[in-house]
């Protein structure tokens, strides 16, 4: 049975979940463990220090500017996605919230942790928690579509690697994304999957799935409203790939853009897995495995991952400053 397009508020006095707290502390421990593995067994710390010390700062500064440009494009994408859910907010305010989300991504688990912060801050602006969350989810969903399209197309042209087909891997991930969105967009498909899940041990995820189903409902009737946001998503993903390209240039290396267009999306997808902080450690391991296929040493691959992280941290600092000085009013308007 298709769920209603309204959601009841969750209780605010729910008892704390000890296992959830344990999972929170587990992520920093996994992150630390991965870095111990990397620096103790895989790489030479002095070699990495030497590579980073010789970094061409001009390329780093340019990478920061490109990163900012990509985020500003994403903020405008979000601004456009408020229309279907009948929310209004100035682009300047949304851009500031976007940068705040970037800043909190540094500390929160996975690279989508800042999405929760953005939803909360937009709710404070609009007083509409459900619709604010819908817009944040669709912003991430549209961005993920562009990321996967770039990865699949680039994988077709990227240099071959040992041990598997990047094209096949990206195609499988893309097929999973399409299948999930077909279920979310089709009432019939959702009903079938919902009934099937109810008969399995995964029945507990039905409520969360229902929330996602409700999130895309306002956009089903306005497909044309997703065209420009999708184009902006391609622009943003191109900026992210360009950042890694510039970081490589800062280290005195150049890699094929077709390979970067596959490796960067794959590392972004891996960073969404909630086992480390902001994808740290996972990104470094993937860089070693992927860029090693192009002849890069482990020291160079980890240096590239660390420089990419440094650019992200520098570019995210304005969000922390904005958050420290903001005065966002709380409103009580119903969604």
Image (spheres, rainbow, N blue to C red):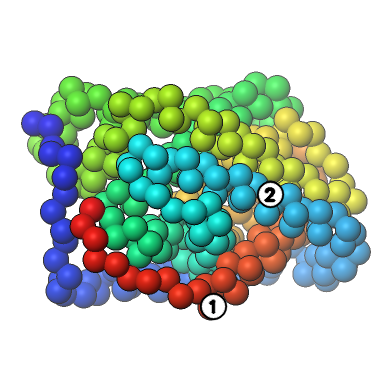
Residue 256 falls in image quadrant: top right
Q: Nearer the viewer, mark 2 or mark 1?
A: 1
Circle 1 SS class: helix
Circle 2 SS class: helix
Gap in angstroms between the C-alphas marked 2 and 1: 23 Å
179 sits to left or right of 266: left
- Asked if the residues shown at circle 2 and circle 1 are in contact, with their CB atoms under 8 angstroms apart, the answer is no
Does 186 sit above or below residue 7?
Answer: above
- Number of numbered discs overlaid on the protein picture: 2
120 sits to left or right of 295: left
Q: How dense is the environment of label 2, judged by Cα within 10 Å: few (below 14), some, or many (20 and up)? A: some
32 sits to left or right of 213: right
For residue 69, the mark is: 2
311 sits to left or right of 129: right
Q: Specify whether residue 29 is in view.
A: no
Q: Position of residue 153 (x, y in %)?
A: 62, 23
Q: Position of residue 108 (x, y in %)?
A: 46, 66
Is 237 or 252 nearer to us in this picture?
237
Q: How dense is the environment of label 1, judged by Cα within 10 Å: few (below 14), some, or many (20 and up)? A: few
For disc 1, the marked residue is 325
Q: Residue at x 60, y 74 (%)?
A: 321
Is 281 or 191 nearer to us in this picture?
191
Q: Specify whether residue 88 is in view.
A: yes
């Amino acid at each position: 049975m298709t769920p209603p397009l309204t959601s009841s508020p969750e209780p605010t006095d729910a008892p704390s979940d000890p296992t959830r707290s344990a999972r929170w502390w587990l992520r920093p421990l996994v992150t630390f463990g991965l870095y111990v593995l990397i620096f103790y067994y895989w790489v030479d710390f002095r070699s990495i220090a030497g590579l980073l010390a010789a970094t061409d700062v001009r390329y780093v500064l340019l990478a920061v500017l490109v990163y900012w440009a990509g985020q500003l494009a994403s903020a405008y994408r979000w601004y456009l996605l408020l229309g279907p859910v009948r929310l209004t907010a100035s682009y300047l305010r949304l851009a500031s919230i976007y940068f705040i989300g970037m800043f909190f991504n540094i500390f929160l688990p996975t690279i989508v942790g800042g999405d929760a912060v953005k939803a909360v801050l937009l709710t404070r602006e609009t007083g509409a928690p459900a619709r604010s969350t819908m817009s944040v989810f669709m912003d991430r969903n549209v961005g993920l579509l562009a990321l996967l399209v770039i990865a699949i197309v680039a994988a077709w042209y990227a240099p071959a690697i040992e041990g598997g087909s990047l094209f096949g891997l990206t195609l499988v991930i893309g097929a999973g994304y399409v299948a999930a969105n077909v279920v979310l967009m089709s009432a019939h498909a959702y009903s079938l999957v919902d009934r099937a899940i109810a008969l399995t041990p995964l029945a507990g995820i039905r409520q969360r799935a229902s929330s996602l189903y409700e999130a895309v409902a306002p956009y089903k009737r306005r497909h044309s409203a997703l065209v420009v946001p999708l184009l902006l998503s391609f622009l943003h993903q191109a900026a992210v790939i360009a950042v890694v390209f510039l970081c490589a240039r800062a280290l005195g290396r150049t890699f094929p853009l077709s390979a970067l267009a596959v490796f960067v999306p794959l590392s972004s997808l891996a960073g969404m897995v909630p086992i480390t902080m902001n994808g740290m450690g996972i990104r470094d391991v993937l860089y070693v495995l992927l860029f090693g296929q192009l002849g890069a040493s482990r020291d160079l691959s980890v240096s590239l991952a660390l420089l990419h992280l440094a650019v992200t941290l520098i570019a995210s600092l304005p969000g922390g400053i904005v958050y420290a000085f903001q005065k966002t009013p709380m409103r009580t308007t119903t969604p």
